[in-house]
Amino acid sequence: MTAAPKTLEIILVNARHLPKMDTFGSCDGFCVFKFEGNTFRSTTKVKTYSPDWDETFTFQVPGDGKAVGKLDIGVFDWNRFEPEEKVGDAVIDAETMNQIVHGVLDQRVEKTLTVYSEKKQGQPVKGKDKENCEVKIILCMKAATIVQAASFARTNSFVNRKTISTPEENPYAKGSRIIDVAVLEARHLPKMDTFGSCDPFCILNFLDQEHTTPTKMNTYNAKWDESYPFYVSDVAKPLGVLKVTIMDWDRVGANDKCGDVIVPTDLMQLIAGAEVGWSGEGDFTVLGEDGKELHGNDKQVCIITLRIKVTGAAKGIDPPEPTDPAVNGPRRIQLTVKSARHLPKMDTIGTCDPFCVVEMGGQEQRTTVKKST
């Protein structure tokens, strides 16, 4: 019997005593983790010798007790117009990694690692303050979870067929964005019903926001072309994964789960920081409950096609210019409720019958009801 796989969580906490890397600045640091053939890349922290990340990366590890290799952490300096420069490397040797990987689950191991120079082998990198450069991480083994990929931002290894383009990193990005995720289609779905094929619908989750597509009946190849907005309050803050779950609708009883697509944190971070108007489309492999590729009724790997677009921040109301403080007397404020979009499904048999209630200064007004929309 094959042992269940496990996952290794690595939290990049911070780095201290980074060297001066830029002529007219300090250091724009980021880290690249390499372990068992997989690669993760952190976000970039600009203009600092002491960056804080608190970012988590997850590697899948076989549960058969097989020996693993070393963990390599490359520390780099990001440059806008020139190639990235390597600061140095921090390493956890294979013996220590095997003790952690084959040790107790849910036990956190904290490590502060010295960064060594690649040019001056065996010599610690000295920071601007002349202290040894260090990286602090926390490692923890967990029970198996679905891991879609190592790192989209640099490897793209988990995407089959049509690969979504990767926007250029912009560590200076800030402010809010709206990310539109369109579920275009799913192909090679599995047989889920005894007397039928599959009645698929998708549930999208990102930043505690959730959307559900309509259900497509009796098909192994569903087409939606439905778009859903997700609001990002600050693109500079760490973001989570985008999770798309494919479900099979059942008329009687609970709906059944087909599988998941996980768009990893580092890709979502790059997309959120991209220029407004950026758009990418790609095919993503669906993973089953066991974390392996889901195969359809035709024995082909199940694929879902997504289109992701950055459409900018939510439109607000521009504040008026300050008025003369001596102005007084009554005023009449007219507010027009123009429209509402992307409403949720509120009725078991139906869609939504919305109306709005506007309250201001102890007064209340109510709009008419719009049926089934």
Image: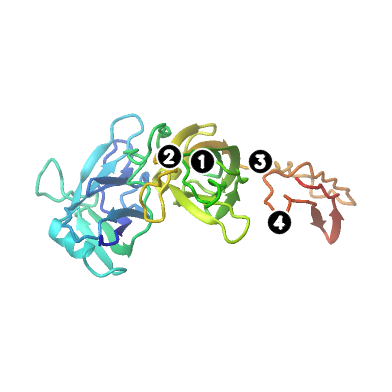
* Residue 345 vertical placement versus 167 (above, below): below
Q: CB atoms at circles 1 and 2 under 8 Å apart? A: yes
Choose between 4 and 58: the one closer to the eye. 4
| Distance (Cα) linking label 1 and label 2 | 9 Å
Query: Which kind of residue does numbered mark 4 sit on?
Result: Thr
* Residue 26 vertical placement versus 98 (above, below): above
The outermost residue toward the front is 195
| Distance (Cα) linking label 1 and label 4 | 25 Å
Q: CB atoms at circles 3 and 2 under 8 Å apart? A: no
Q: Can residue 130 be seen by looking at this rendering?
A: yes
* Residue 141 vertical placement versus 307 (above, below): below
Query: What kind of element bears circle 3?
Result: loop
| Distance (Cα) linking label 3 and label 1 | 39 Å
The outermost residue toward the right is 330
Nearer-N-terminus badge (2/4): 2
Residue 315: which disc? 3
For image coordinates 51% across by 41% down, the residue present is 220
Nearer-N-terminus badge (1/4): 1
Query: Which kind of residue does numbered mark 2 sit on?
Result: Asp
Instruction: Name the residue that disc number 4 marks.
Output: 348
Query: What kind of element bears circle 1?
Result: loop
Residue 298: which disc? 2
Residue 220: which disc? 1
